[in-house]
Amino acid sequence: MTPGMTPPPQTESASLDVSGDGIMHLEPRPFRPFKTSEEYLYAMKEDLAEWLNTLYGLHMTAENFMEVLETGVVLCGHANSVRRCADQYQTEHVGASRSTLLSRLSACPPGRCPTTGQARAGSFFARDNIHNFIRWCNELGVLDCLMFETEDLVSRKNEKHVILCLLEIARRGAKFGMAAPILVQFEQQIDREIAREQAGEDAEDAEDEQELEDEPEEPPMVYGPTQQVVTNDLKSLDEMEPDQQPGRQGRGLDEDPSDEARLSFAAQGSFYNLTLHRAPNFVDP
């Protein structure tokens, strides 16, 4: 344990709850809404102070939060604790799948964070401790938007980024079984609920796809050439059928020879009238 850190006191506030996944959680507190960002920032400092008190037996509050951290001793000590938990996790999960083990251990740098235990606030050694912790966080892969500078902590001018950085380190440590702050517990709970909802939606989609596969398939439609439609009839009158020629409805005179024979032996007057009607050019003047 890093010098300057005493074992956690045995109080009710230091009680831990070990979940089924091996991650230790602090005792949850009732949720309360916040009206301003300053109130939310103060609540985060309270949560982190209680978390660090539980881990290292400190006497940190929201009021002296930055004062306790400005020597860098607590920060470097916590970094080395995360490293030890990662080593212990690797030893206890030798039979775990290689992909799962590598995904967790890759989030933790292999080296330890050097520290000077007797550093005083504002001294060179305190700044060196803070610098070592910042370099350790960079090796851990913490995003730049969550990082802070040495002067931010020494001059206490950027509390927000100091808090965000510690929360990110707490998330990484929770993967190896370290106690998680209340805010990190809320995030993990939300992630689990989202994962369950996503799993339910995926199951419903799989059922819908199975129902579609079980439905009988309709026979495929065969598309082929269609009969050409003739819009213009170019047949001449000679090519047309007798019934289709104008003025000749029904059976014509040339269709049956017997009709012509009967006409030739018809009465002379009737034949004469018929001849006049049909061929007036053959009448004798």
Image: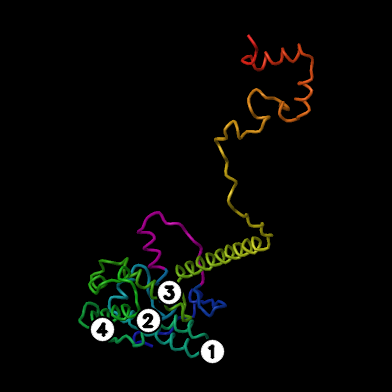
Task: Tell me the quarter of the image containing the C terminus.
Answer: top right
- The spot of residue 67 in percent (x, y) is 30, 73
Which of disc 1 and disc 4 is earlier in sequence? 1
Q: CA distance from mark 2 to mark 4?
A: 16 Å
Q: Circle 4 is placed at which residue position?
A: 119
Give yes or no for residue 259 being in the magenta stretch: no
- Which residue is at a point 42% across and 77% down the rendered structure image? 172
Query: Which portion, as a residue range, is magenta?
Result: 27-46
Which of disc 1 and disc 3 is earlier in sequence? 1
Q: CA distance from mark 3 to mark 1?
A: 24 Å
The amino acid type of the residue labelled 3 equals Arg
Q: Circle 2 is placed at which residue position?
A: 78
Give the SS element for disc 4. loop
Give the SS element for disc 2. helix
Which of disc 3 and disc 4 is earlier in sequence? 4
Which of disc 4 and disc 2 is earlier in sequence? 2
- The spot of residue 169 in percent (x, y) is 38, 75
Q: CA distance from mark 3 to mark 2?
A: 13 Å
Q: Circle 3 is placed at which residue position?
A: 171
